[in-house]
Image (tube, rainbow, N blue to C red):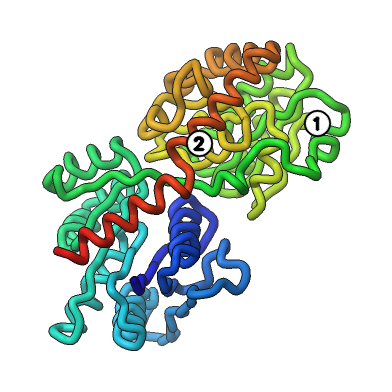
Amino acid sequence: MKIGVTCYPTYGGSGAVATELGLALAERGHEVHFISYAQPFRLDHFRERVFFHEVEMEDYPLFEHPPYALALAVALHDAARKHELDLVHVHYAIPHATSAWVAHEMLGEESDLKIVTTLHGTDITLVGIHPSFQAITRFSILKSHGLTAVSEFLKRETVRDFTVPEDRVHVIPNFIDTSVYRPGLEPCHREALAPEGGKIVMHISNFRAVKRAEDVVSVFARLTAKQPATLVLIGDGPERPRVLLRAEELGVRDRVVFLGKHTSVHELLSCADLFLLPSASESFGLVALEAMACGAPVVASNVGGLPEVIDHGTTGYMFDVGDIEGMAEAGLRIMGDDDHWRSLSEAGRAVAVERFSAARVVPQYERYYEQVLRG
């Protein structure tokens, strides 16, 4: 198959999964064309059967906000014509599904370009449901020939909030390369991250309010009062100053290492003894899966798609949003009992390999593409 892929190329779950899917499909013999305003951050070197087409934008004084959705539609149209694409797979509904539909209409009878749209989370639960976008979001996803969601939770949200027929949404979970995300990576950065020894507690996010990163610090403060530990924070975003201020207020700033954005988070996760994810909402929780694959037990909020990833009591623990005390108690139990930690670690790794590895999930997309192409 010749497949176009459109995603946001920045740091984030949807872009990471879209890029890894495209690369995996290319390894399986398909021709893959990425179409976006910038090269996806994980498309870091030459790969056979992988091509990148940059969406060309022209600044013009008339436009306060350049019309990216229209420029993307033109780029999709051009790529479909020149490279005879069989389908285009867009990740994140707005504006990608809309642009894909416009490209399809532009092609007319010249090509019956099929559109597969994958819903990742905030495109449905936050952006798409906003009154200014809800109608166009619903229109665009219903015009897609194939529609997938990354979790049963997100499927339910889509069916409820956009009156989409239940049988239109096919759940295919996020996935990771478990040969990359794995325990015991060498060289390990443990000594650099925690030079004074002790356990390593980790959190990775975009540091937006929904991630409740201040709760991470509050949980950590309770942990480190009884168990020597270092908190490693990875990522960046608008809540970062509040998080570091909270660490100062709780007297643990000297035990917090802030690393900012990193592309090779698997190298850091393999050093973690505990991963904290106290989010107010997660449509899937890709970073929790990455932590589990690296052998780090996860303590998280019991929200959204996280119960589909974390097996409570087996691979980690889940609590109500804001239950700092419960999360701290679970963290202490995990880090204070080597046998229990090992049990959770091994179970998490097994779940990642058996349910969410690329080898298990990528063929599901291939079969779905074939179904869509058959009509």
Mark 2 and mark 1 residues within 8 Å of each other at the beta carbon: no
Classify 10 Å Cα crowding around label 2: few (below 14), some (14-19), many (20 and above): many
Residue 49 x %, y %: 48, 75
Q: Which residue is mark 2?
A: 352
Q: Is residue 252 visible?
A: no
Q: Is residue 25 visible?
A: yes
Q: Residue at x 21, y 54 (%)?
A: 134
Residue 152 x %, y %: 29, 37
Quadrant of the image containing the C terminus: bottom left
Q: Is residue 36 left or right of residue 327?
A: left
Residue 165 x %, y %: 11, 46
> Which amino acid type is shown beneath numbered disc 2?
Ala
Q: Residue at x 46, y 48 (%)?
A: 359
Q: Is residue 347 left or right of residue 5?
A: right
Q: Earlier in the sequence, mark 2 or mark 1?
A: 1
Instruction: Give the structural element (helix, strand or loop) at label 2.
Output: helix
As displayed, is residue 256 above or below residue 48? above
Classify 10 Å Cα crowding around label 1: few (below 14), some (14-19), many (20 and above): few
Residue nearest the viewer, comparing 61 with 216: 216
Q: Is residue 14 left or right of residue 243?
A: left
Q: Is residue 167 left or right of residue 346?
A: left
Residue 38 x %, y %: 51, 72
Q: Which residue is mark 1?
A: 254
